[in-house]
Image (tube, rainbow, N blue to C red):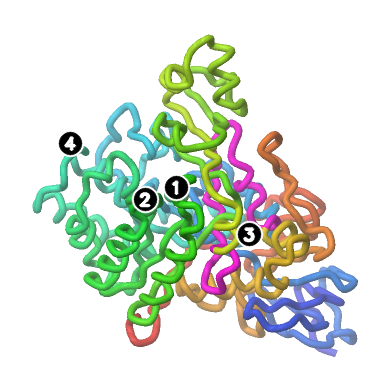
Amino acid sequence: MNEPYDLLIRNASIVDGTGAPRFAGDIGIRGDRIARIGDLSGERGHAEIDLAGRIAAPGFIDAHTHDDRLMLSNPDMAPKVSQGITTVVAGNCGISLAPMPRPIPQPVTPPLNLLDEKGDWFAFPTFASYIAELRAKPAATNCALLVGHTTLRVATLDDLGQPATAEQIARMRALVQEAMEAGAVGVSTGLFYEPSVAAPCEEVIETCRPLKEFGGVYCTHMRDEADHVVDSLEETFRVGREVGVPVVISHLKVVGPANKGRSAEALALIEKNMANQPICVDCYPYTAGSTILSADRAASSSRVIVSWSKTLPEYAGQDLDVIAHKLGCTEEEAIRRLSPAGGIYFRLDEADVQRILKHDKVMIGSDGLPHDASPHPRLWGSFPRVLGHYGRLLGLFPLEMAVYKMTGLTAKNFGLKDRGVLKEGAYADLALFDAETVDEAATYEKPIAPAHGIEAVIVNGTVVWQDGRPTGSRPGRVLAREAQEGGR
Ligand code: ZN
Ligand code: CU
């Protein structure tokens, strides 16, 4: 008999994150790594978990988050680890907490206020200082970090309504260089949003230049996800080609009733271009989106829920039409009185959501907004919803495929070495769950609720979630991107 394992997981149904069929076995963990997978019935562990046939999978990787601040302000990461998530990709949609080399202008420019309404957390003059803080005060989850183009603009430009000048681009490019040297894995843009809509494609390309040297990725909340989605896809491909790096299309969707069904066209165009350049895609499993409250977004939605409001916080969680009625005004006027505020917008078609979700190259990302008073349920529910609602109940894909879309595929796309798969020698990031009961508990009405069926969650060999609550351990690390073979 060998030396006891630090943690021995017995009688697991192992879904290894590659998409391969599950198999029965035990998993022995030593330190932060998986030491053995197989029949370990003759072995012992200092700690043991008997799964009695339930699932052991790689810990889920949330491909799309806004957890930059959550990792520091709520390091237990309950909305994430309660779903089985062990790694978050933060800094999406052009919004990152760092760097902010000058005091952040007040009031905090939307959508940066999604991370922090007051601005106190935008306190890291360099990306290195942000990473140093995450290392000094680790969170429960690992992270891979993007530097946001909108953050760089707010840090650099005085007039956000204009394209950056050559000199401003040079300053933003230097900030990207610093972030990549410090350990960022890429740059994100939010060209859809007001302060970055003014940035032409050329500004993005020139700002992103340092990515190539570091083998980084370019992630984008595209300029248009509605009538002009094809133009936006072409713009995204162009940035990838000209900078020479992989692109990640964030939360792929087709917005508004006029574009119903066009997910087929978007996916076909993406597939066609995947033959020529590396393209990755993530999506969240809901027909409602969520971001800053605005009249134009509300106008194209069948229903709007207010997720937070600075001026009238008591209305968070209520429908906009109900609020307007209570205030005795139009919905447009209500939006004015509620702002700055957040909204949940019902404006996607279920068949489009399913077509994108089901595509075998599409990763799962929650896009959860952790600081909203009444958040979109995707914050607490995305991953279990894919496994339960879409996998088990609607039969959109087998469990092995659902797990692959939230583990192996994501680790490969972001270059996260020895993550996202269960194999000997890999890091011991695991989600242990019951395939029969796993599902979201969060709803639009009651959005803050830990998922059903999650048994335990392990990060770098340490249990971070068990018996329905955080254990208090915070073994999370800042992960580097491993450059892909062939420079692609
Ligand atoms: Zn976005
Ligand atoms: Cu986002």
Whether residue 147 appears in this view of the structure is no
| Cα gap from disc 1 to disc 4, whole angstroms | 34 Å
Q: Amino acid at mark 4?
A: Asp
Q: Earlier in the sequence, mark 2 or mark 1?
A: 2
Residue found 62% across the figure and 64% down from its top = 60
Q: Nearer the viewer, residue 270 or 256?
A: 256
* Quadrant where the image shows the C terminus: bottom left
Q: Are marks 2 and 1 in contact (CB under 8 Å)?
A: yes
Mark 2 and ligand 1: say if the CB distance to the nearest ligand atom is below 8 Å.
no
Instruction: Give the residue number, with chain letter if any, for mark 3.
Output: 85
Instruction: Give the residue number, with chain letter if any, for mark 1.
Output: 258
Image spot of residue 376 (x, y percent): 59, 41
Q: Amino acid at mark 1?
A: Ala
Image spot of residue 185 (x, y percent): 39, 65
**Secondary structure found at label 1:** helix
Q: Earlier in the sequence, mark 3 or mark 2?
A: 3
Number of marks drawn: 4
Residue 238: name its quadrant.
Answer: bottom left
Instruction: Give the residue number, with chain letter if any, for mark 2.
Output: 227
> What's drawn in magenta, residue-wise?
356-385
Q: Nearer the viewer, residue 328 or 367?
A: 328
Residue found 60% across the figure and 33% down from its top = 374
| Cα gap from disc 3 to disc 2, whole angstroms | 34 Å
Q: Earlier in the sequence, mark 2 or mark 4?
A: 4
